[in-house]
Amino acid sequence: MQDADDHLHGVDGANPRGYEGFEGVVAPDISESTPWWPQPARARAGAPNVVVMLIDDMGFSDIAPFGSEIATPGLSALAAKGYRFSNFRVTPLCSPSRAALLTGANPHRAGFGYVSQVDPGYPGLSMQIPHNLPTLAESFRDNGYATFMVGKWHLTRESEMHDGADKSSWPVQRGFDRYFGSLDGYTTLYHPHRLVRDNSPVTEEFGDDDYLTDRLTDEAIGMIGSLRTGSDRPFFLYFAHHAMHGPVQAKPADIERHRGAYEQGWDAVRQARFRRQLADGLFPPGTQLSPSGPEITDGVPAWDDLDDEQRALFARHMEVYAGAVSAIDDSVTRLIEHLTAIGEYDNTIIVFCSDNGGTGEGGVNGTRSYFSQFFGHPDIPSDWVADVPRPLELMGGPRVHGHYPRGWAHASNTPFRMYKGQVWEGGVHSPLIVSWPGGLPRRAGDTGVRDGFAYITDIAPTVLELAGAHRPERLQGAATVDADGASFADALRLGSAAAPRPGGQHISLMRQHTYYRGQWKLIAPQPTDQSIPFTTTAALDWQLFDIIADPTELTDVASRFPDVVAELAEEYRRTAWFNTVFPMVHRRALDARPSTEARLAEPVRIAPGLPTMERFRSARLVRMRSFVVEATLVGAPGEGVLVSHGDQGGGYILWLEGGRLHLSYNAYGDMHRVSTPFAESDAVIVATFTALDGLAWGIEVRSASASLRLDRVTMLAGMAPFTGISVGFDGGGPVDWDVHERHGRFPYRGGLRDVRYVPGEPAPYDNETLVAVDEITGHLLD
């Protein structure tokens, strides 16, 4: 670099600006000047591509390399040339794991001590990655990489996912050159409720057989292909599948692959998976399978205790789940085939893992009415249906939003106990595969199994080290803050000869706590009594397990090693302060909403044809309250949808067809339909939803001469209606399948000026008495 004014000639006492950092020569005349072009960041010669594929809610044993009966040839090929980690941990929930993976920082330090559906107002729960904490995308871009993402983001506050929101936390603003997927915590695999490309909503119509897992794979391959048309830059691809999160759906051919495979039941499947895990060396000889039984599995009965109808239904649920796993494996296969075809597979690092354990949110009996599961009330009516019956042949398809019973989650998490949302091993023990054929070839005799402890914060430093990339020291003009993870690159190269991971590792969720160090796992697994303020970790009911000798947490040895308990509890306390884990909040505190969201519940006027309004923005207008919908027609009535809100999981739709005004109300799959003749011109149609006792709405639709009524329908609450409001067409998933089969989106043909939503009074019961149902785990929480 030249001195500050060496490149300026003939300044003559002037005070020039704008030349700072310029490394050419500037004179009054161009004949005496020398141009200079800054060089862009370039990756090192031969730098590998990096693909990180994260699966949602998939259990430890759900793929063949980790014991599953589900054939996953793509993943098996990846593991055959790569490495399987049998001792890898994640957090128990979606957003915290994603924040930790992308930043290498512990979740609370990344702002995500819980999922982004909450915003209680504390640093560890800010639900926003700090601007000076670089993501992997920002790090790789700083090293000259192209950066792509497809799939689930879930790292933006839900109040900031609508089109008018501050987008500073959206993927493209956090380092990704291109993005395609859902910002939300999950979506349906048929008729996704809202997809975003870069910073804009995707408005195209999806066919009934368009399957999101396949579409994400198409998009990822397309991004790579576009890059290769004009550049040889290496790329970083973050591929975050929406599967296996509920509602679980699969393609008919993939379901058919597994027809009859689960008639033997979850107990037999679990035993068989464990035998394969032991045979593959994933656990040491003598490891015992964690026990079954309703009292220790959150209610899972023995398969032999079910009747024939239950077995047929539950087996079908698992066929659908297995079909969705098959589609993920096909995605891996297609990606590998594409990389091979362009000659880049050998020089691509591929990481594959899940964000948490398999989930028991489907309940003991599973559900075909997914969104009705996430709501509770002390006086919930007796006719509330958590599983609206559907024919078995429809399950897995676009008309059913289902989830498998908890017994299959118990099998998914073989050999561990419990589920997503809990700090037992079933909630935090994930499969991990790492492959780099050209850079980390397996030595002869190496099984590829790595049994050293690793945590999800370790992925970022590992792939950066393997790629020879640096983490930026400055981001957006500010010095970056430290990460927390430790690279496990040496474990990949050296196996058991590598040094163990330094220090301990905490995992905290609400008032569940665990701390790992060496052979020990200290755990306080159940939320503290909410009536007792949290004051000190010494007050917790700690349990202690030797996870080397007892990886499935069968024997609590806390009474034998009180000194170890006290030492690790104190380490956990210091670690919690160091990682902004405090304060320890309970579920009620997470129900608080910031005052800044109040504006989202103000009346709004929506013009026809605009993109479907985002889910949360739409819900603020109707959730747990009375409301009015006004549609203003201009001229003679036409035909088509006036307004729709929701999908096959629950919603309502108002439309004109055949000279009649129609209303359909979908109560989590239970359909209600009414209609009346309609011939008015320049009409105002007013739909009044009145909140009634017992979690219900009464609906009345009126115009000058027409009237429709539904005296009492089950209220849509929790995450329903899932698809947001569409005016002039039925966007996202269809509310009424019969209308959809006849007309598709059924755009309104006629004069529709707009639709106005006017939120009304809160429902006539005290919202403070609601029993909170965790939207992620499906468990009732005090």
Image: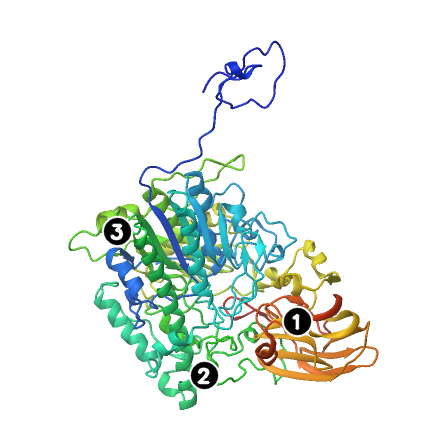
Dot 2 falls on a residue whose secondary structure is helix
Kindly report the distance in space between the C-alpha atoms of the residues bearing marks 2 and 1: 27 Å
Q: Is residue 17 left or right of residue 456?
A: right
Residue type highlighted by circle 1:
Ser
Figure quadrant of residue 341: bottom left
Figure quadrant of residue 446: bottom left
Q: Quadrant of the N terminus?
A: top left
Q: Nearer the viewer, residue 548 or 522?
A: 548
Kindly report the distance in space between the C-alpha atoms of the residues bearing marks 3 and 2: 42 Å
Residue that lies at the very extreme toward the top in this rendered image: 12
User: Residue at 44% of width from left, 65% of height from top?
Assistant: 213
Please provide percent x and percent y for residue 319.
Answer: 39, 77
Q: Callout 2: few (<14), some (14-19), or many (20+) C-alpha neighbours within 10 Å? A: few
User: Residue at 54% of width from left, 12% of height from top?
Assistant: 9
Question: Which mark is drawn over residue 393?
Answer: 2
According to the picture, the residue beneath numbered tag 3 turns out to be: 437
Give above or below for 21 relative to 512: above
Which of the two labelled residues, at mark 2 and mark 1, occupies the earlier sequence position?
A: 2
Residue 71 showing in the rendered view: yes
Q: Is residue 221 left or right of residue 402?
A: left
Residue 572 showing in the rendered view: no
Question: Which mark is drawn over residue 644?
Answer: 1
Kindly report the distance in space between the C-alpha atoms of the residues bearing marks 1 and 3: 50 Å
Residue that lies at the very extreme toward the left in this rendered image: 444
Which of the two labelled residues, at mark 1 and mark 3, occupies the earlier sequence position?
A: 3
Give above or below for 468 relative to 305: above
Dot 3 falls on a residue whose secondary structure is loop
Residue type highlighted by circle 2:
Glu
